[in-house]
Image: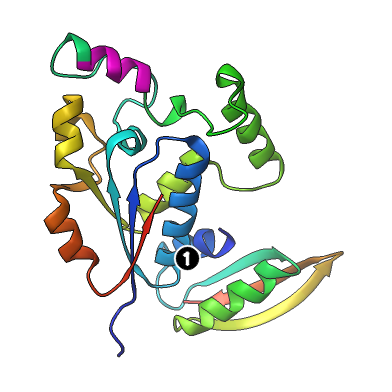
Amino acid sequence: MAEQKKLSIIAFSGDFDKLTAVFTLGTGAAAVGYEVNIFFTFWGLDAIKQKQGRAFIGSNWLTKVFGFMMGGLSATPTSRFNFFGAGPRIFRYLMRKNNVATLEELVEAAKALGINLYACEMAMHVLGLRKEDFIPEVKDVLGVASFLQLSEGGQTLFI
Amino acid sequence: MTFVKTKIELSRLQPGDTLEVLLSEGEPLDNVPRNAREQGYNVLSVEHVEGTTHKVTIRK
């Protein structure tokens, strides 16, 4: 049997639309047999927080305020047409209406397909986040060197 | 996404079980049976249901 194909995605953005791209590509690749690794860093970490809404998560008052302002998956803004938070609601409505998977459904699909989810150690340190703040499906906390090793021999995307 | 959902449903079945999937013409109807075959599943039938909807039966 040929070696398994591999897709590794660096999820930097915490935007609703860009995270939708991350999970659409990831689940699509996993469904056709790719090994998929997603490395969440900086704003992208919002997608894998245990608390999907807004919560004061952090190690001190400043990171707690940042944590609240950033929020989790359900609080992600769209990169355009955000309209002070109405944008994601409109897009979720349009996606449901057109029978397209919503971001939440895509994340559930990623878990069901066994996609490897990783959190960036450095960004977690800056934002005062701990592994316990993330969903249990997050496999590990990594740095750049480990991610490069994981992604070697496959395709890599930065979103 | 159609194949993603199909694949997740297939993973919940036992070998020998069958899955019926309703698909629209175009990309989903091209994509799902092709990928299912490529991954070693047995595509038993593709039947026209109504309008642009087709029923694909896959055996695990």
Direction right: furthest residue: B51
Q: Main secondary structure of the magenta part?
A: helix
User: What's the amino acid at mark 1?
Assistant: Lys
Q: Which residue is mark 1?
A: B7
Direction top: furthest residue: A61
Asked if residue A57 is among those painted magenta in the image, a careful observer would answer no
Asked whether A1 or A141 is in front, the reply is: A141
Asked if residue A65 is among those painted magenta in the image, a careful observer would answer yes
Asked whether B26 or B46 is in front, the reply is: B26
| A140 versus B37 height, above or below | above
What residue sits 45% from the left and 29% below the top? A76
Q: Position of residue B9 (x, y in %)?
A: 48, 61
What residue span does the magenta drawing correspond to? Answer: A63-70
**Where's the N terminus of chain A, which quadrant?**
bottom left
Q: Position of residue B58 (x, y in %)?
A: 56, 76
| A5 versus B23 height, above or below | below
Q: Position of residue A17 (x, y in %)?
A: 53, 40
A146 sits to left or right of A134: left
Looking at the rendered structure, the secondary structure element under dot 1 is helix
| B32 versus A71 height, above or below | below
